[in-house]
Image (cartoon, coloured by chain):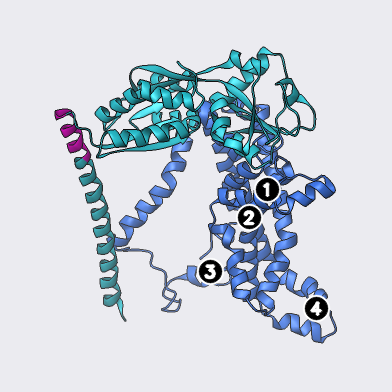
Amino acid sequence: MTSLHEPGAAAGPRTGGPRRRRVRVGAPLPLLLPGVLALAFLLLPLLALLVRAPWRSLPAQLTSTEVWQALQLSLVSATAATAVSLVLGVPLAWLLARTDFPGRGLVRALVTLPLVLPPVVGGVALLLALGRNGIIGKWLDSWFGITLPFTTTGVIIAEAFVAMPFLVISVEGTLRAADPRFEEAATTLGASRFTAFRRVTLPLIAPGIAAGSVLAWARALGEFGATITFAGNFPGRTQTMPLAVYLALQNDPEAAVSLSLVLLAVSIAVLAGLRDQWLTGS
Amino acid sequence: MTRSVRRTRMLQLAGAGAAALMALSACSSSDDSSTTKADKSGSASPKLSGTVTVFAAASLKESFTTLGQEFEKQHPGTKVSFNFGGSDTLAANITGGAPADVFAAASPKTMKIVTDKSDAVGTPATFVRNQLEIATLPGNPDKVASLKDLTKSGLKVVLCDKTVPCGAAAQKALDASKLKLTPVSYEQDVKGALTKVELKEADAAVVYKTDVKAAGDKVEGVEFPESAKAVNAYPIALLKSARNAEAAKAFIALVQSAEGQKVLTEAGFLKP
């Protein structure tokens, strides 16, 4: 993203403008000390995970069917939750960024609610709405015979509920930064509103959508509270990796560490995939 | 430019941060000293004070809450603070260094996690036993009459995870009667399993008799003979890291006293 600015900054601080000059030496102690402390605080627990990992028994533990099932389910459900978020979330982001309607600010605030809501509360809310006895779930059950709790679909719903806001926020931000005049130009040239969205806006905000999807995917992968509350815990059907880690910790802490390592590795891979944004970003 | 202004502002910020840190550490250290003082005065005179922290199995929630209130009434100035949860989680927390005075587990196996790490003082004492029961929806619409009925297809049954005592006991009862049961979920503690029935998301759950009783008319209990083969003994122990050992001992004594036993049997527990 910032690659256009980067060469100028890298060529030498003297040639850059006085405003964006980068300080490379002589960081003041009051900043350096807490900064390094913060870094240690964030990285030390992860380091502990690596140090205490039962490396010798690791291959055996990771190839056990239960772990495989959990990992597979985690990957599949996180991907499905991201797909749901994309299909529903991108249009919502567009509505929030491009249209004007009464109470839009409130809607935007409500969209971000699942971000700050404790996931267990989200799970309870989902149960009350979509559970077999929930306000909507009751009708799903009696009309179509569909029950969502204790199913893989339930896992996907729980994950999408928690992850979608990340995508909406990120896409909405990109949309706001994108120039709406391109869309307007397209419509004045005869394209319909939807064609303009499809052919002009979507390609324009593709990087934002990609970043938002990865964020949502990573959040879905780590989702625990809403899943265990709404979808329960059954190996192969609703037991995702975080649930497996939690229950493994109860009677086999070594296995919990191995499982955590897998999640850590996947998360690092995701961040590496986002390197344009975060690893080399300004 | 405004470099000097910036620098002073930075210093101010850092200073404020350091002050906050100092205040925090000062707080915690004064906290420590006050508890040790309380400990000393507790051992010097029989008058108990301070907080007793009790980690107890989720199934003990109702009866222990009652006993805690009783204890506070008997010993003014004391406070009993509870942490209820799956016995395994609690055991893991204790061996991980969680500050607790008393541990009451729902099975000897989970207590063993704590005694193996020699985190308990003396030998844990069994104070009650608990038997399993099937919890069904009010009115028992699915006509569940036996453990075997739970294996009917189409019935949504919830069990506790095998890692927690109620799950281990349920598995024992199922094995003893050679039944194979596929639940819709393995919940992380007995209350989690019961809640799914209370919310009518599941049709039945295998939980403790005491939980069915505590849930009142939100669920209906169905006894089954196989539960006799999977009775759980509940051990209680004083923990080595106890910061308020005197009061903790007094609480354990209350649990084992005739008065405490009365509260527990009223809740549906069996005598030890």
Left or right, B8 with reference to A91? left
Q: Chain of mark 3?
A: A
Q: Which residue is mark 2?
A: A163
The three-letter code of the residue at mark 1 reads Ala
* Residue A57 shows up from this direction: no
Which hue is chain A drawn in? blue
Q: Secondary structure at mark 4?
A: helix
Q: Is residue A129 placed above or below B2 in the rendered structure?
A: above
Residue extent of the magenta highlight: B35-45
Whether discs 3 and 4 lie on one chain: the answer is yes
Label 3 or label 4, whichever lies nearer to me, is 4
- Which residue shows up at 57% across the image and 36% down it? B216
Please name whichever residue, A229 or B204, is drawn nearer the observer in this view of the structure. B204
Q: Could you give the CA–CA distance between mark 3 and mark 4, rounded to whole angstroms?
A: 36 Å
Question: Pointer 4: residues within 10 angstroms few (<14), some, or many (20+)?
Answer: few
Q: Which residue is mark 4?
A: A193
Q: Which label's residue is closer to the chain start, 1 or 3? A: 3
Q: Which label's residue is closer to the chain start, 4 or 2? A: 2
Q: Which label's residue is closer to the chain start, 3 or 2? A: 3
Magenta stretch prevailing secondary structure: helix
Please name whichever residue, B33 or B151, is drawn nearer the observer in this view of the structure. B151
Location of residue A77 in the rendering, given as x and y in whole percent from the top left corner: 70, 45
Q: Which residue is mark 1?
A: A78
User: Mark 4 and mark 1 in contact (Cβ < 8 Å)?
Assistant: no
Residue A6 numbered mark, or none: 3
Q: Chain of mark 4?
A: A
* Residue B159 shows up from this direction: yes
- Which residue shows up at 39% across the image and 27% down it? B103
Query: Which image quadrant for residue A276?
Result: bottom right
Q: Could you give the CA–CA distance between mark 1 and mark 4, rounded to whole angstroms?
A: 32 Å
Identify by letter the chain in cyan. Answer: B
